[in-house]
Amino acid sequence: MARNHLRSVEVTGGMFGGTAVTANAEAVVSRARERHARALDDRHRSLAWIGENTAAATTALGKADQAGAGAVRRGNAFDRPV
């Protein structure tokens, strides 16, 4: 998953060089990476929740449709001439 891949990459000392400015850049990139990883986690949880609720709604609607079809069939059987 993208979040696992993102977390597997570390921002290390000296990655951008050895000056004071690059030390600050490493800190900024590290914080941004963590924010992105948290955002991916949040989106994953949201999408999982949507998927679970969609599956439950689909099942409920399918059962309601089957019950309605059965009721229509039973109703039509009584209206037929003998």
Image (spheres, helix red, strand yellow):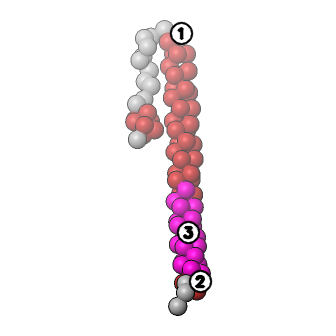
Label 2 belongs to which residue? 79
Of the 4 image quadrants, the one containing the N terminus is top left
Report the disc number at residue 21: 1
Q: Of tags 3 and 1, which is closer to the observer?
A: 3
Label 3 belongs to which residue? 65
Binning the other alpha carbons within 10 Å of mark 2 as few (below 14), some (14 to 19) or many (20 upward) gives few
Which image quarter: residue 65? bottom right
Residue 25 horizontal side relative to residue 2, left or right: right
Q: Is residue 36 visible?
A: yes
Q: Amino acid at mark 3?
A: Asp
Q: Answer with mark 2 or mark 3, whichever residue precedes in sequence.
A: 3
Q: Amino acid at mark 1?
A: Val
Of the pair 72 and 78, the residue shown nearer to us = 78
| Dot 1: element | helix
Residue 6 position, x and y percent, is 43, 33
Residue 45 position, x and y percent, is 55, 48
Cα–Cα span, label 2 and label 3: 21 Å
| Dot 3: element | helix
Residue farthest toward the front in the current orientation of the protein:
81
Measuring 42% from the left and 16% from the top, which residue is drawn there?
14
Residue 66 position, x and y percent, is 53, 72
Q: Which residues are magenta?
A: 54-76
Cα–Cα span, label 1 and label 2: 86 Å
Q: Answer with mark 3 or mark 1, whichever residue precedes in sequence.
A: 1
Measuring 48% from the left and 8% from the top, which residue is drawn there?
19
Of the pair 19 and 44, the residue shown nearer to us = 44
